[in-house]
Image (spheres, helix red, strand yellow):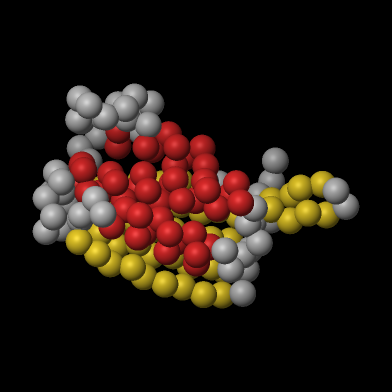
Amino acid sequence: MNNQMKLEFLSLAENVALARVTIASFASQLDFTLTDLEEIKVAVSEGVSNSIIHGYGNQPDGTVRVIASISGDTLELRIEDDGKGIEDIPQALQPAFSTEPDRMGLGFVFMQSFMDQFQVTSEPGRGTRVFMVKKQIVHEGGVDKVQGLEG
């Protein structure tokens, strides 16, 4: 199966739930488990929240884009903003690092642990792009295998 979608919305906290539910519905076209779908929802929530909080500083006039595609047994997600960007990506990926003192700094950690592939690109003053991949687990003879991943 091949399919794709794009969701674009203002950087309002209320739109985190919209992105989360929309992407989960789109992802359900594949045979993901309920646990997989919950993990996808958390990863999307964290990515969109990062755009709103860190990219746009909670200002409601920014634009967040979520692009999703299904190719075979693979879901690909991109979350993009045109916000302030990330100065030091390796530092931002460290557990418990946050530019906001009241935040736990675990968003990227959750995205990395819940998705099969994860990448962040950013340019200060020009925004951030988060790319994530989740492969469908195929059940063969009582053994779970992830399509296209070795290990």
Total number of numbered discs in the rendering:
0
Q: Can you say whether 64 is above or below 145 in the image?
A: below
Q: Can you say whether 7 is above or below 90 in the image?
A: below
Q: Can you say whether 71 is above or below 111 in the image?
A: below
Closer to the camera in the image, 91 or 35: 35
Residue drawn 74% across the image and 56% down it: 138
Residue drawn 51% across the image and 37% down it: 113
Q: Looking at the picture, how far across and down is residue 13, in whole percent?
A: 24, 50
Closer to the camera in the image, 151 or 59: 59
Q: Looking at the picture, how far across and down is residue 99, in whole percent?
A: 20, 30
Residue drawn 62% across the image and 65% down it: 30
Q: Looking at the picture, how far across and down is residue 14, in whole percent?
A: 26, 54
Corner quadrant of residue 20: bottom left
Q: Quadrant of the C terminus?
A: top right
- The residue lying furthest to the right in this view is 141
Q: Quadrant of the N terminus?
A: bottom right
Closer to the camera in the image, 71 or 52: 52
Judge from the rendering whether residue 69 lies leftward or rightward of residue 148; answer left or right: left
- The answer to whether residue 61 shows anywhere in this view is yes
Q: Looking at the picture, how far across and down is residue 114, in whole percent?
A: 52, 42
- The answer to whether residue 148 shows anywhere in this view is no
